[in-house]
Image: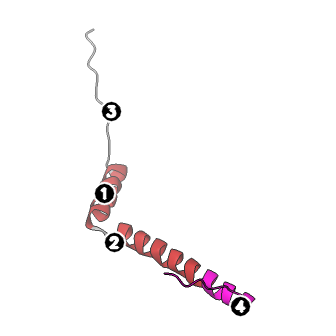
Amino acid sequence: MFKIEVVKVPEEVMNVRFAWWSFFAISVLFLLLTLSIGEETRDICRWVFEQVTKERHFPRLSLPL
């Protein structure tokens, strides 16, 4: 904790930057996979698909003549 490291070579900066961006990319990928493979998401998608493909009819109005 008391040691301060000074980065002098540009390659070291690029390595650190790549490490942090790869950590971010892996985290985003993990979140997307978790949300897309989850049971609740699958059930919601199934329900939405059923509602979209469901055949609907307008109610018939019987008017007194």
Nearest to the observer: residue 31 or residue 15: 15
* Residue 30 within the segment the image draws in magenta: no
Residue drawn at x 52%, y 74% is 24
Residue position marked by numbered label 3 in the rendering: 58
Q: Amino acid at mark 3?
A: Phe
Label 4, label 2: how many angstroms apart (C-alpha)?
A: 38 Å
Circle nearer the N terminus (1, 2): 2
Residue position marked by numbered label 1 in the rendering: 44
Label 1, label 2: how many angstroms apart (C-alpha)?
A: 12 Å
Q: Position of residue 26 (x, y in %)?
A: 48, 79
Label 4, label 3: how many angstroms apart (C-alpha)?
A: 68 Å
Q: Which residues are magenta?
A: 1-17
* Residue 6 within the segment the image draws in magenta: yes
Please state which of the two labelled residues, at mark 1 or mark 2, is closer to the viewer. 2
Residue drawn at x 56%, y 79% is 20
Numbered circle sitting on residue 11: 4
What crowding class fits label 4: few (fewer than 14 Cα within 10 Å), some (14-19), or many (20 or more)? few
